[in-house]
């Protein structure tokens, strides 16, 4: 059974903090996700990366893993770290593949059967391990499944109105389908928790949770400027900007009216209060409207005469 260097798998130093480990995992998971990467070894690399993060992303599992240190030598016995004394390992049948296809190394030391900080009952890939009670009977302890994190792309319309959507993810245990309720008001970085939908429990233990990290998709009309505030651009004619006008602006909730003051300038930013994304409790962010003055590309004969007349009579000098 080969020792696996999880730090090397994620490309981080052994003293890396949790944020660095998480960032490295996300980058590699996106790179090797089978739905994105169709390479022959993509799925295997995805499982390796997931296995490494399953250990290094959990403070307790990482502590146990670090405790192995130089005591571990591939395919040889090793001196157990504190808390492992008295554990009896037995050879079992080949059996079905273990925790999502994770390695023997993971299954033996971090997979099925950890409870209260010590190995308990459970069956891994080709091995079983149990602890003995004082009477000599073998006791099996349940273990909770691991939490799983994935990204969920959401449109601004879904973030505004709320939605339900189907999602299919490639997890360490294989492809799984989910029905997800997206509440109105989610923002970039919001986390949606699906209780019990993460890694499977072992020995009768409960399943872990699935956490979906919201990523807002780009929109052709609106951009998010701060949490629940949006920005859009509206085109106006020279005379609307010069004379003032009331113009129609598209919002996620439908058309709204915007009043332009006489002398409005290109690039000027106006605010429509309460026309952004919902915050909850009936409150909404704001929509900022940026003005862009446009001129007609083709003029009728009369329009050309009027512009020429304006040029002759106007004292306005835009360049000073």
Image (spheres, helix red, strand yellow):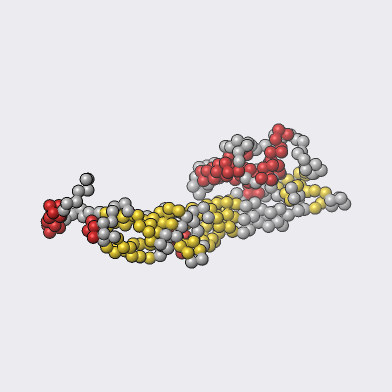
Q: Residue 77 or 251: which is nearer the viewer?
A: 251
Visible residue check, residue 9: no
Locate residue 7, reporting x and y percent: 61, 38
Residue 20 vertical placement versus 116 (above, below): above
Residue in view at x 38 percent, y 61 percent? 272
Q: Residue 287 or 58: which is nearer the viewer?
A: 287
Q: Classify the position of the C terminus by image quarter.
A: top left
Locate residue 280, reporting x and y percent: 51, 63
Residue in view at x 66 percent, y 45 percent? 59
Residue in view at x 13 percent, y 54 percent? 313
Visible residue check, residue 246: yes
Q: Residue 9 or 172: which is nearer the viewer?
A: 9
Q: Residue 10 or 2: which is nearer the viewer?
A: 10
Locate residue 124, reporting x and y percent: 70, 47
Q: Classify the position of the N terminus by image quarter.
A: top right
Residue in view at x 43 percent, y 57 percent? 229
Residue 313 vertical placement versus 6 (above, below): below
Judge left or right: residue 108 versus residue 241: right
The image quadrant of residue 78 is top right
The image quadrant of residue 209 is bottom right
């Amino acid at each position: 059974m080969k020792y696996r260097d999880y730090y090397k798998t994620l490309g981080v130093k052994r003293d890396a903090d949790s944020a660095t480990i998480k960032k490295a995992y996300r980058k590699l998971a996106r790179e090797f996700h089978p739905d994105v990467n169709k390479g022959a070894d993509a799925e295997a690399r995805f499982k390796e990366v997931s296995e490494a993060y399953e250990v290094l992303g959990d403070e307790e599992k990482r502590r146990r893993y670090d405790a192995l240190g130089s005591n571990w030598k591939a395919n040889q016995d090793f001196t157990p770290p504190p808390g492992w004394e008295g554990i009896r390992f037995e050879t079992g049948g080949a059996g079905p593949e273990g925790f999502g296809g994770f390695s023997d190394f993971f299954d033996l030391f971090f997979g099925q059967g950890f409870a209260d900080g010590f190995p308990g009952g459970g069956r891994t890939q080709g091995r079983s391990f149990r602890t003995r009670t004082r009477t000599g009977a073998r006791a099996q302890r349940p273990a909770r499944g691991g939490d799983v994190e994935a990204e969920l792309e959401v449109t601004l319309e879904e973030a505004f109105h709320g939605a339900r959507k189907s999602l299919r993810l490639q997890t360490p245990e294989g492809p799984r389908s989910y029905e997800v309720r997206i509440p109105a008001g989610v923002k970039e970085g919001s986390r949606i928790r699906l209780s019990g939908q993460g890694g499977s429990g072992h020995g009768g233990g409960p399943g872990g949770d699935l956490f979906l990290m919201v990523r807002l998709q780009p929109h052709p009309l609106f951009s998010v400027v701060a949490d629940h505030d949006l920005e859009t651009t509206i085109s106006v004619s020279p005379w609307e900007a010069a004379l003032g006008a009331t113009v129609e602006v598209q919002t996620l909730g439908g058309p709204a009216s915007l009043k332009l003051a006489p002398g409005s300038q290109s690039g000027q930013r106006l605010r429509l209060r309460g026309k952004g994304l919902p915050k909850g409790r009936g409150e909404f962010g704001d929509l900022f409207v940026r003005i862009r003055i446009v001129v007609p590309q083709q003029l009728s004969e009369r329009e050309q005469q009027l512009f020429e007349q304006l040029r002759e009579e106007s004292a306005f000098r835009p360049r000073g």
